Image: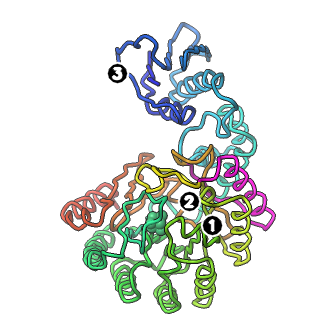
Amino acid sequence: MKLYLRGHDCRYAMEQLQLSLFPGEPSSVAEPGELPAPGEDLAISQLSAGRQWLTAVTAITLHGQTHRVARRIPLTDDERLRRRLLQGCYYDCALRFLPQAPAWGALSGVRPTKLVTAALLEGRSRDEAGRELRQVYRVSPQRAELALDCGEASVRALARTTPEELSVYVGIPFCPTRCVYCSFISRSCEHERHTLGQYLQALLDEIDYTGRLLRRSGRRISTVYFGGGTPTTLDAGQMEQLMAALERAFDLSHRLEYTIEGGRPDTLSAEKLRLMRRMGADRMSINPQSMNDHVLTLAGRQHTAAMVEQAVAQAREAGFAELNMDLIAGLPGDSFDSFAQSLERVLALRPENITVHTLALKKAAALYERREGLPPVETVAQMVGWAWQTLRRQGYVPYYLYRQKYMSGSFENIGWCIPGHECLYNIYMMEEQQSILALGGGGITKLVKDGRIERWNGPKDPLQYLSRPEELRRKKDEFFAALGR
Ligand code: SF4
């Protein structure tokens, strides 16, 4: 389905909207001046200005059917209003082809909460922000409430830091084995222990170099997050080296939290958990994804649900007062009953955070081609609905969310927490109001300054990371130079 833009260059927003409203249709954008081919599936989005009115017209032709919609507003130069007019017009036209209105309406981005947070920070009330979501973007009342809850949590979390502070991400793109749904470039450690050792050495060098730049900049660190991969793939000695290097190079005395993802319980031990707690980590993520052993085996994981329970008990004994656990709705071999039982078993452990993901089928994942045993989208919807009800009943509230392309149905990933136990890093990363400094492979460094965001994707593959030390240093120099004091 080719998108033709006439009289405006709102390319990115319109393309994203088309992709999200017609996910099953191959989509592209026509070059300026390009003419439609006969019989082509297409959308034409046109904007024209008269003396009094700004008029948008959308015409969509799909599978032999054509619909056309026009909308107008008083003449304006306000870019935001022009974009809304174009999006609203396209959305109304697209609705004529859809079996039902999408839950997120005309919102196509991965971070719907940002809109609410911005409105609340500008001084608008919850009611006003909710009205904008429902009336302007046609978001369903249920999703609007979800976004409002998350937006309010963001405002509280942002009040605890300043835009001048930084969050630090440390990437360890290694895992014990590869999950079938994984699309990250994460090396399996079954055959690559030696690469992990080299990787750690390069990371220690990068930390040391960056620490000197950071001290000179005078910037404070608000949160630390070890992600991956599975950072706890490092053995206890390697983890101690890494955490000690970070402590030496960076002043972490003002940090609000220090999180380590220990996604796979087969990478955790009582000794390693005690060590991480002693070295300053105060939040662990132990992610079962499912508490059904058969589903875990099909997912390519090498642990059982009982091992998850044991790791959680060991983390509590080690002194971790903040735990997150992830579940995925839509895994191969899973059913509604088995998902509900997984949720019950996780709830029995009373983690402070539970993140409910919906399976996203990405091309790089082994599951993408096979697609065996996937529950139907209606079952996934039931699972997600059940999680919403059950978590609310048990006193959890949503505090952050993001949407993904290729996700099963029109769903989202939601972080739930016992009130007051939000993971601040997740919020800061999602809201993009604070710079993120990524170290190691697989992270995204974000420079947030004067209302602009610059992103730099670090090398994803550990071998690429090892081969580019000069580039990594140069990027760090540029980051701190642009950040200023
Ligand atoms: S634990 Fe996460 S990063 Fe590792 S293989 Fe599984 S999905 Fe990928």
> Quick one: SS at disc 2?
helix
Q: Relative to 326, is 227 on the left or the right? A: left
Q: Is residue 460 visible?
A: yes
Image disc number at residue 338: none
Quadrant of the image containing the C terminus: bottom left
Disc 3 versus disc 1: distance between alpha carbons? 45 Å
**Label 2 C-beta lies within 8 Å of the nearest ligand 1 atom:** no
Residue identifier under label 2: 427
User: At label 3, which amino acid type do we have?
Assistant: Glu
In the rendering, at what x and y percent does residue 27 appear? 45, 30
Residue identifier under label 3: 31
Closest to the observer, 92 or 341:
341
Q: Residues within 10 Å of mark 2 (few under 14, many from 20)?
A: many
Image disc number at residue 422: 1
Disc 2 versus disc 1: distance between alpha carbons? 8 Å
Q: Is residue 63 above or below residue 448?
A: above
